[in-house]
Every structure is written in C-alpha cells, then in structure tokens.
Amino acid sequence: MPDSDKEIFCYFFEKGELQINPDGQVFPCCFIANSMYIAKTFDYPKPGTLKRRGELDDIQFQLEEAESIAEWVPQRDWIYSEYIENENDLCLDNKSINEIVNHEWFKKIEKAREKWETAPIICQEHCTVGCNRSGHMSRKKMSGRE
C-alpha cells in the first residue's frame, strides 16, 4: 500500500486521553509509555551493556526480555530521545498536566501524526489505517474500547 493511502488514527488523541505511568511521567498513549517505562527501569542503557538472560536468536526471548526493549528504545526514534531529554518537564512531580500537554514535545507529536510519512515509528506501527486493494480499511478505526 502506498504511504499516501495511510493515515494515523490515534485512539488516545481522538478520545482526549493520556497515559500516566506510576512514576508520574505523562505520555500520549500506552504504546510509548510502556516501552519508555521499561527503558527507564534499566536507566536508559546503551546497546550491549545489559546482561542477557537467554539466547538472542530465540524469538520468545526477544519478545519477552525487558533488557532487549530497554536497550533499543532510547535510540529508536526522535520521540524517545526527545522525551528522555525533557522527562523532568513531562512529569507530574514537576509540572501541571496543562503544562505537560502544552509542552513542545506533545505539540511536535501532534503535528507529526498529521501525515503518515512524518509520524513517529511507533505510531506508524500501531496506529496506521488505510485502504487495501479492495478498498476496505486495513485496520478499522476503533469507536470504543473492545
């Protein structure tokens, strides 16, 4: 499917919801929040610095191992690296919810998600909708939690 046929449909954005992690960090959705929480738990490690608990070629290991997620998150996309740079300003311990959602990081995401081509990778992977060859939606826009 050509990228021009794809769009980002963000359930959290459309519903005006946010994800607030137990440590007070505020995120636009659970997809970003979950991976950032794991990375922060391991203090944003550099690739290759954490001890592995299994075989790297084992798919089950790759899907379940938090260390693997923690290492790739910080350098995967601008959305993560810029969050880390601004995490003190995006935490309820330091700022109000209004200050956080009006922070430049949130505004940048809102602007970037307007086009599939400029959307963060995580949005492209989890929140893309578009028409397939038959004209049907390849992923339906959710009207409510299912």
Image: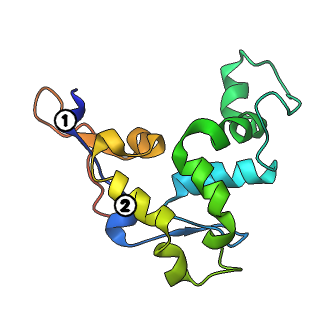
**Quadrant of the rendering where the N terminus is positioned:** top left
Tag 1's secondary structure? helix
- Determine whether 34 is above or below 129 in the image: below
Q: Position of residue 68 (x, y in %)?
A: 73, 33
Q: Residue at (63%, 81%) from the top-left corner?
A: 95
**Quadrant of the rendering where the C terminus is positioned:** bottom left
- Determine whether 138 is above or below 83 in the image: above
Q: Position of residue 77 (x, y in %)?
A: 54, 41
Q: Residue at (81%, 50%) from the top-left corner?
A: 43
Identity of the residue furthest to the right in this view: 51
Q: Residue at (42%, 57%) from the top-left corner?
A: 109
Binning the other alpha carbons within 10 Å of mark 1 as few (below 14), some (14 to 19) or many (20 upward) gives few
Residue 51 visible in this rendered orientation of the protein: yes
- Determine whether 28 is above or below 62 in the image: below
Tag 2's secondary structure? helix
Identify the residue position indicated by label 2 in the image: 110
> Which of the pair 116/9 is nearer the observer?
116
Say which mark, if any, is on residue 60. none
Identify the residue position indicated by label 1 in the image: 4
